[in-house]
Amino acid sequence: MRATSAYLILSTPRSGSTLLCRALESTNLAGTPHEYFRPEGRYWARHGAGVDPVAYIERLLLERASPNGVFGAKVSWRHLLHFERTCRMLPPYHEKPLPDILSELFPELRYVRITRGEKPRQAISFWKAYQTGAWGQIAGQENVTTQAPAFDFEGITKIVRMLEDHETGIDEFFDEAGVRPLTVVYEEFVDAYEETVRTVLRHLGTRVPDDFVFAAPPMARQADAETDAWVERYCQIVEERSRDPDTKADRLPH
């Protein structure tokens, strides 16, 4: 069936968005919120690249909604900008604000934002995953990595800045849209898993049966003692450099 309502989850890398999306998908009440707008993604390559974006959205609404008519997608800031550029190629969308384009394409559109408070830890999670190739761990399974990660202050700092820039872009998008999204904070989400998923479903206007049983979290926590040590080491270097008058400001996180 074609979706009668839709939602977008705006996220930054390693913010817990995959855990949230898989949790929502497992309910069978919130569509299949995957990365449909990731330019390197298989779904975009197969159905979206070189296709009228209006037709692409229509296909998503027809094929990827849950039985109750809900469609969802996970969108990073980079993916959203890519989709905007695609839409700008169509005359009706040359000048139209992006929030208006999205509201026109998606029925009854709602927004969820997931963010993470500890940016150094988020950046370290990204840095380690980038080096090892272990981007996610299914509960009950062990990660198979190709190499051991190496700490790099400058590399991690670049990721911190990227995350901050993407968060700023998302802030500006919602300001332009005049929308206050439901915000999920990763650190709170992992401590209140089922309650958070219920809150998101309520935000989407989705009725949850009284006897509904939520599945266990599908993803395992990847952070370990090494991650904790890296976070401490990183924060110590930031503090030391902030006290050094010879340290250039542009070499530290914002």
Image (tube, rainbow, N blue to C red):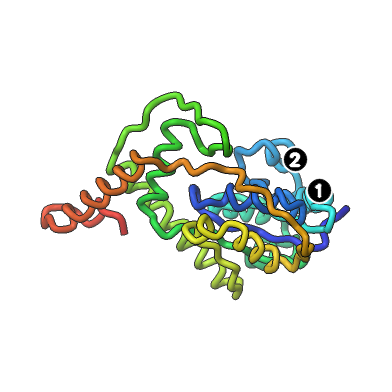
Q: Are marks 2 and 1 in contact (CB under 8 Å)?
A: yes
Classify 44 as above or below 245: above
Please determine whether, in this image, residue 57 is positioned above or below residue 98. above
Q: Which residue lies furthest to the right in this view?
A: 1
Q: Name the residue under label 2.
A: 47
- The residue lying furthest to the top in this view is 146
Q: Looking at the image, tell me whether mark 2 or mark 1 is earlier in sequence order.
A: 2
Q: For numbered disc 2, what is the local secondary structure?
A: helix
Q: List the residue tagged with mark 1.
A: 59
In the figure, 12 relative to 203: above or below? above
Residue 95 shows in this picture? no
Query: Which residue lies most toward the front here?
Result: 211
Depth order, front residue of 132/25 = 25
Would you identify the image quadrant in which residue 173 lies? bottom right
Question: At x 52% / y 55%, what residue is drawn?
Answer: 190
Instruction: Out of 51 and 207, give the one closest to the viewer.
Output: 207
